[in-house]
Image: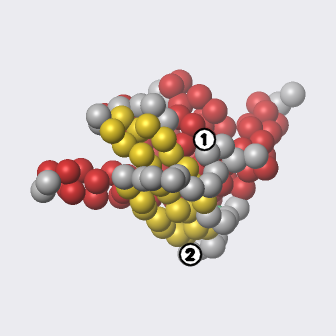
Amino acid sequence: MELDEIYKEVILEHYNKPKNFGKLEQSDLVSEGMNPLCGDEIYLELAISDGRIKDVRFTGTGCSISRASASMMTEIIKDKSLEEVENIIKKFKGMLLENRDDVEELGDLKALKGVRVIPVRIKCAILSWDVLEQGLKEYMERKKSE
Ligand code: ZN
């Protein structure tokens, strides 16, 4: 099987059976965003304690790339510290926006590497990550002023 084929399968698998899809009973952070170019919408909920992502869910509508990216993102950030999450965000964005290839720790997310040659799809892949980053920023600011 071609590498591209495997990648396509990973994306389709997450699109058809997204991980952590739904809502949390209690969340510490909600964040949402959309990509008007494609019509993708992501709504993200996180439960955070002791500086770690305890739980995460997302809902939304959109194309296979945006949904697969959100699904894989929720998988990789669960149980990670906020510091680790920031590093993962940096890695993922570096892969798509700066053509970086030092991305072993991204696991399945490497399947999205192919979209970096299709600029209009980069926005689809990055949407959930922007939503996460924005949410974390607001969370940190809220914590600081508490
Ligand atoms: Zn899209």
- Residue 123 in which image quadrant: bottom right
Give the distance between the C-alpha atoms of the residues marked 2 and 1, in whole angstroms: 22 Å
Q: Position of residue 52 (x, y in %)?
A: 36, 35
Nearest the eye: 118 or 73: 73
SS class, disc 2: loop
Residue where numbered disc 2 is placed: 36
Q: Which mark, residue 128?
A: none
Q: Please give the name of the residue rendered at 79% of the width and 49% of the height, measured from the top-left corner.
A: 16
Q: Which residue is mark 1?
A: 72
Cβ–Cβ under 8 Å for marks 2 and 1: no
Point out the image quarter for the N terminus. Answer: top right
The residue sitting at the top extreme is 104
Horizontal and vertical percent for residue 33?
48, 67
Count of marks, rendered view: 2
On whether ligand 1 comes within 8 Å of the CB at mark 2, the answer is no
Q: Secondary structure at mark 1?
A: helix
Left/right of residue 145 with respect to residue 66 in the rendered view: left
| Residue 105 to residue 124: above or below | above
Q: Which amino acid type is marked by label 1?
A: Met
Residue 88 is at least partly visible in this image: no
Amino acid on which disc 2 is placed = Pro
Which residue is drawn at the image coordinates 66% and 66% (left, top)?
61
68 to the left or right of 49: right
Horizontal arrangement in the rendering, residue 110 relative to residue 32 (left or right): right
Q: Residue at x 41, y 38 (%)?
A: 53
Q: Which of the 4 image quadrants contains residue 137?
A: bottom left
Nearer to us: label 2 or label 1: 1
Residue 109 on image: x %, y %: 60, 37
In this rendered view, identify the residue nearer to me: 39 or 7.
39
In this rendering, is residue 78 above or below 41?
above
